[in-house]
Image (spheres, grey):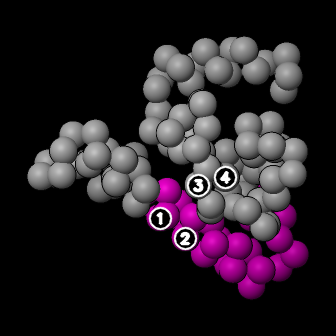
Amino acid sequence: MTACRPWLEAEIANVDPQIVVCLGATAAQALIGKTFRVTRDGGQFFATDLAPLITATVHPFSILRAPDEQARAAEMREFVRDLTRIGEKLREALRALVGRRARVYCPAVGM
């Protein structure tokens, strides 16, 4: 990750996102910090110099590795909950950018 960091930072600077979402612990620890734990800190939002907000959730593949169907269903509910929160934060950020009265539609989050 260290070798790729300059390119990642350049990509993020070009895109200028309101929120960066890390999928999985490896990405989160590289961008948020080595002490970050998805199970403990996932779904929280942090301010960084990369973007106004950064957060993390599980990597979708980890859901498939859950030991049984019940565990997969529970993990999927948590994943959807995190994505819903991210969508709400993105909507708030976009509204702040374009003004409170504007209707905001973001195809990526279906809002």
Task: Identify the residue position indicated by label 2 in the image.
Answer: 81
Q: CA distance from mark 4 to mark 2?
A: 12 Å
Q: Is 54 in the magenta?
A: no
* Residue 54 place in picture, x, y as percent: 59, 45
Q: CA distance from mark 3 to mark 2?
A: 14 Å
Which numbered marker is on residue 84?
A: 1
N-terminal of the two: label 4 or label 3?
3
* Residue 68 place in picture, x, y as percent: 83, 79
Kind of element beneath mark 1: helix
N-terminal of the two: label 3 or label 2?
3
Task: Identify the residue position indicated by label 3 in the image.
Answer: 45
Kind of element beneath mark 3: loop
User: How many marks can you see?
Assistant: 4
Q: Quick one: quadrant of the N terminus?
A: top right
Q: Is 77 in the magenta?
A: yes
| Residue contact between numbered discs 4 and 2, judged by CB atoms under 8 Å | no
Q: CA distance from mark 2 to mark 1?
A: 5 Å
Q: Nearer the viewer, mark 3 or mark 2?
A: 3
Query: Which residues fall within the magenta stretch?
Result: 61-87
Instruction: Name the quadrant containing residue 2.
Output: top right
Three-letter residue code for mark 2: Arg
Task: Identify the residue position indicated by label 4 in the image.
Answer: 56
